[in-house]
Amino acid sequence: MAEIHPFRGVHYNQSLVKDLSTVICPPYDIITPQLQQELYHRSEYNFVRLEHSRALPQDTATGNQYARSAATLEQWLKQAVLKVDEVPAIYLHDHYFIHQGKEHRRRGIIVCVRLEEWDRMVVRPHEGTLAEPKHDRVSLLWALQANTSPILALFDDHEQQVSSLLTSTEPTKPVISLTSVGGESHYVWAITQPGVINQICHSLAHQPLYIADGHHRYESALTYHREKCVCSPLVSGDEPFNFVLMELVDFSDPGLIILPPHRLLRGRSKSTLDGLMAELELLFEIDKLPLTMPGVWQQVDDLLMEADGIRLILFGLTTEQLLMLRLRDFDAVSQMMPYFHSELYKTLDVSIVDHIILEKLLGLSDEETILDYSYDRLDAINRVLDQEYQLAFLLKPITPAVVKAVADAGDRMPRKSTYFYPKAPAGLVFHRLV
């Protein structure tokens, strides 16, 4: 099924760029305007200039941020700020980070994967997407002809075949060694032995890949591929634009952590909020937990993780009280959701919140931008207490098994259902499509 290839990676020349911590950046989708500005000032070679360049008021259709990124890439290659590896490789990436006071390691392999249309079920999505980010990424692909940041995808490492290969052949000296970037460390090794590469590719060839993070990048790469095929009358199928950069992680990797994107809402009228409790009581049993009660968060965790029934936490309707919502009648709620979704989709906390509470009860439409997300429940609560938002909906995290099951069913969760933590950075190693 999945066709995996090594590639000649492009990365910083550490003889010229000594401190890599000043030049890598997050992927484009979490770079705020403020962070973009900070990254620009951090180093003249910060990767943000390629990954998410600044738009300027005087930009034109041809003189814009994408053109500047392309010019910067060519300049950095000419100046040897960036170098291209001579031998194709599969890149082993160990990503160390701290979560809840404990150090974790997420191990992935950075490879090129042949692009496949969704209906072939070779590469499987699990979330919906938006049009605007795809337009941005397609424009960048045409300008740079490069995948600047890898898509994070998951695979089943049956009998730990890939893991065993990586452990037995792990090179001694990393090509990239980067420590202490916001509490994170990165070590990247280049695996160049043809025999090992063939074994890894063969181990992954008979199974699908599941996109964890990077749906917009994959759909943008598909669009770019289609457009290139139209523009290129003679296409062999082996051109670089037929492939996309991915970092593959085993579903069972202990460093695979998924955070729940808690919903934050503002902009609803007082009368709408005043009537919400009565509407909720028709669908849910509601218990109140004082926010200041000793051990409240442990009790919340225990209640959310109980196997029987669907439970949600709502904050903001009552003063300093968490509302524990237990769904009364799943069948009734199921009928209120779009008919084309799977039964599994309809049981997800995020589906209940988005379709039933936000859309049906509160009248929120897709066009409205009064919804935000937080990946820390205390932050979500505090933003309501500070009156920045009116309501916070706290969700339990989606498990990797549920991600797989939804994708296998050919379904997609609501947007912002999962947050794979931490994000794989841009600027470690990337792939040119020329």
Image: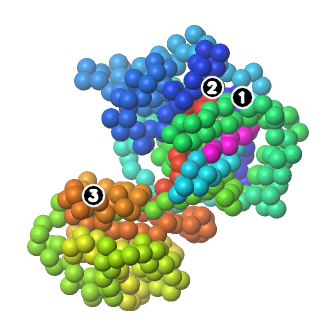
Which amino acid, mark 3?
Answer: Arg
Identify the mark nearer the N-term, 1 or 2. Answer: 2
Q: Secondary structure at mark 1?
A: loop
Image height of 20 relative to 1, above or below: above
Identify the mark nearer the N-term, 1 or 3. Answer: 1
Which amino acid, mark 2?
Answer: His
As measured in the structure, the alpha-carbon distance from the residue carrying label 1 to the one carrying label 3 is: 42 Å
In the picture, measured across the screen, residue 388 lies left or right of residue 295, that is left
Would you call the spot at circle 2 few (<14 residues within 10 Å), some (14-19), or many (20 or more)?
A: some
Q: Residue at x 63, y 19 (%)?
A: 13
Q: Residue at x 71, y 50 (%)?
A: 2
Which of the two discs, 1 and 2, sits closer to the camera?
1
As measured in the structure, the alpha-carbon distance from the residue carrying label 1 to the one carrying label 2 is: 9 Å
Q: Residue at x 68, y 37 (%)?
A: 187
Image height of 404 relative to 229, above or below: below
In front of the other: 225 or 60: 60
Circles 1 and 2 in contact, beta carbons < 8 Å: yes
In front of the other: 112 or 91: 91
Residue range in magenta is 89-96
In the picture, measured across the screen, residue 333 lies left or right of residue 13, that is left
Identify the mark nearer the N-term, 3 or 2. Answer: 2
Please provide percent x and percent y for residue 161.
82, 55
Instruction: Kindly identify which residue carries mark 1.
Output: 175
Instruction: Kindly identify which residue carries mark 3.
Output: 383
Visible residue check, residue 130: yes
Instruction: Kindly identify which residue carries mark 2.
Output: 11
Would you call the spot at circle 3 few (<14 residues within 10 Å), some (14-19), or many (20 or more)?
A: some
Is residue 30 magenta-colored?
A: no
Picture colour scheme? rainbow
Which amino acid, mark 1?
Answer: Val
Q: Secondary structure at mark 2?
A: strand
Which of the two discs, 1 and 3, sits closer to the camera?
3
